[in-house]
Amino acid sequence: MLNASLKQLATQLLQRKISSVELTKEFLKHIKTLNQELNAFITLNEEMSLAQAQAADNMIAAGEAHPLTGIPVAQKDIFCAKEWLTTCGSKMLSNFISPYDATVIERFNQVGAVNIGKTNMDEFAMGSSNETSYYGPVKNPWDSLAVPGGSSGGSACAIAARMAPAATGTDTGGSIRQPAALCGISGIKPTYGLVSRYGMIAFASSLDQAGPMAKSAEDLALLLNVMAGFDTRDSTSIQREPEDYAHDLEKPLGQLRIGLPREYFAKGMSNDVASAVEAAIAEYRKLGATIVEISLPNARLSIPVYYVLAPAEASSNLSRFDGVRYGYRAEQYTDLEDMYKKTRAQGFGAEVKRRILIGTYVLSHGYYDAYYLQAQKLRRLIANDFTDAFKQCDVIMGPTTPAVAFNLGEKSSDPIQMYLSDIYTSAANLAGLPAMSIPVGFGDKNRPVGLHIIGNYFREAQMLNITHRYQQVTDWHLRVPAGLLEV
Amino acid sequence: MQWEIVIGLEIHAQLSTQSKIFSGASTAYGAQPNTQACAVDIALPGVLPVLNYGAVERAIKFGLAIGAKINSPSIFARKNYFYPDLPKGYQISQFELPIVQGGSVKIQVGDSEKIVRLTRAHLEEDAGKSLHEEFHGMSGIDLNRAGTPLLEIVSEPDMRSSAEAVAYAKALHTLVRWTGICDGNMQEGSFRCDANVSVRPRGTETFGTRCEIKNLNSFRFLEKAIDFEARRQIEILEDGGSITQETRLYDASRDETRTMRSKEEAHDYRYFPDPDLLPLEISREWIEQVRAMLPELPEARRHRYIQDFGLTVYDASVLTAAREIADYFENTVKQLPTQAKLCANWIMGEVSGRLNKENIEITQCPVGPKQLAELLMRVSDGTISGKSAKDVFDSMWQGEHSGNADAIIAAKGLKQISDDGEIEKLIDQVLAAHPQQVADYHGGKEKAFNSLVGQVMKATKGKANPGQVNMILKKKLLE
């Protein structure tokens, strides 16, 4: 049951072979067994989860079931969920019980999905290893010495360890795809504006995008069907006809043209990752795809551009955490300014402070033009590269990360090395393009390798189709870390 | 040395929308603290702003009324600074591309007209309020006002005296109320002024160093603050000192300005485009729709009153100080097209005097324009004297005889005696009864004539037409 696909679970629930309450209890039991070691969840609330499961069972009994009714979903702790502690991985919000639901949470509630718990994450989604969380690092289920990636490391870990059949993540520079790759699961960051950002605690508003994380492309399609949709409460949400992302899953690949960016394969990729990615591309060739060499000449600028724009927006977005209205406030202070300083000095971790400083600096008088404006111009160039590339191909593929999961502590003292984890992923955020990662094998120390797929705007259905076809002929996505599922 | 004062104003007009600029919470004034602050206004984690297009429409209306350019797109930007009544740690405003650019306003100072150019007007949200008095050793925060839509209207440094600054502020005050985009209530803070003041030797081109005076919430304070500030700067310069650029606060109780923060302490607001809001696009069609909704503007009306009704510039200006007054005037004149001056005099005199006394608005005036016209008709056709008309007006105000002028005149017997024969008969009686005065008059005492007029009026209980009495009496005395 813990290893079943969403479709299988839905069938079991619908045929009343298992109830949502039973299913939820089973996952909660598994979580309790593993969470001490893996630290994937920050908050569990058995009572609330089971109440939702009971309500789901009632919906099923009443014949009102939706494909996800009664299915447990782990929610990244960046989403505000009513009456749930919502910490965003920070001491700053360690006492914040949200009085309202994020749109994503609301949409899952409406179809009767069960919130199984809030997953661990890098503080305010700033990190690539889950080590910046106030609640401690998450461990990679494949190797307890390895990081799970970040910032959606808790969600990726929960899926890989089968602590939940589905999870949500958010991705500002790679925060869904990088942990998905490092934990050997599937994840998609949709086109910017497809999923509402309302109630999702902002890191860098022009880059943040929520998406599902699961075992397979098929599961992602079912989850995206719930998550995607126009929302009047988010002005950057895009109004368009709803789509069934599962509709085209079985479509043959046809004349699929896969673009391989020369720059991504030139250097920087480790050999183990390269061979797994090449094997996956060979598999696509077998499925009938043609390979086109393309060029993304400005892609190398992604990391510097990203590390100007994201901190700039973050420095402003995080100003509301000032100790005045909610969240953490320093216990002792002499006056208002002292209260601000102590609250923010004590409430934020080192990485968050580093980014606030960078962001404040690049927006400052006299530096704005040289950094922020310049980065905005380069952002356009990076996006234009993709527009050109998509004239020659349907999707772009490459490695999700330059190497397999690194060890806990290995990069935590070297922020630049840490930032380079997002070297292949951040360009899609800068361009607003949909991108995903699926498991395609194992590299050094038997740690998972992810294949990165970038699609054109709103081509999520196509991307899910081609990754589903790949998963039909391979079984990387079905592999489970040894020893975790001994029942 | 002769000094010239240079003034530019920044005016914050609160836009008259029911809900806030980026949330659905109410903007009504005076509610219990924090009862009109929703999740967006208190900046909970994860919330997002959604633009209220009613505020945009009002900004467009203003732009069209001053002949400005409506920018499309315009950009919302974040102005970053920390303060407890600023929940997000930034204010959403407009910086590089404001919605309204340019335009001008015509002002009247004494007999001369002047054009004041506007730099820009931009949309922004208001902050909340800090309450320092009610809590011991602590401050309270009321976020009801946070997110209230404001239009910040920035003028060019075109004004040269406090009188011009006040005339400009009043012209804008009239305009925003006239177009219905702001209620103009200065006590409640719906219309607030900041003044940039500098001085320079008359005849020089370059501007002096300016000081900004904050938060002037009445026209009187605006005038006094500018006068004080100009004097202060001139004194410093004449003593050989120099002006420090700074923000100053006007203290009305001491009638002085004092330093609030210096240039060195000025914030670096780190403006950047708000990524939560898309560039604001305004279509041609929308602009035209708004243009079609615009009422005839005060300046056009003023012009028309002078041209069509022959009113003086002063009268026309007074009558167009508010749309409600102008409408009242026009509805009165409509009934009495040849008596515009009479109508104007009555509205500016009797009617507004009474409104002021009772402290009510013209829209609540118990004597409507049609009723007033009925009364003035009786003045213009000689049925009653101007003096009796005031009595009738008073009765109408009290609602006697359903405020019907003719009924009141009849009931009070105020109808003038205009029949020559009747008046002659009365005069004959008076002359016969007062031979001494007649003799005095013939003896050259002018005063005796007035006394005889008085006797005639007394005999008619004031109902005789005084002009007629004068004429006939003179004729009789010459016989």
Image (cartoon, grey):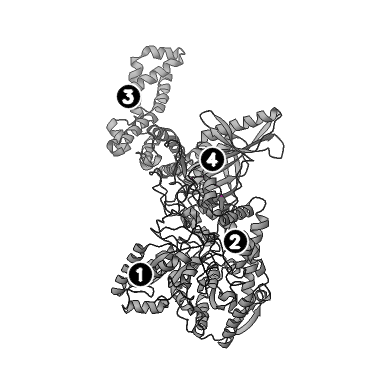
Q: Residue at x 43, y 19 (%)?
A: B478
- Residue A131 in view of the camera: yes
Q: Is residue A58 left or right of residue B187?
A: left
User: Do the dots labelled 1 and 2 sit on one chain?
Assistant: yes
Please, what secondary structure does the residue beneath circle 2 have? loop
Q: Which residues are magenta?
A: B80-86
Q: Would you name the residue on which mark 1 appears?
A: A25
Counting other residues with Cα less than 10 Å from the Cα at mark 1, is it few (<14), some (14-19), or many (20 or more)? some
Please, what secondary structure does the residue beneath circle 1 have? helix
Q: Is residue A288 magenta?
A: no
Q: Position of residue A89 (x, y in %)?
A: 49, 59
Please, what secondary structure does the residue beneath circle 3 have? loop
Query: What kind of residue is marked 1?
Result: Lys
Q: Mark 1 or 2 closer to N-term?
A: 1
Q: Are marks 2 and 4 in contact (CB under 8 Å)?
A: no
Viewer-proximal residue among A211 and A471 = A471
Query: What kind of residue is marked 2?
Result: Ser
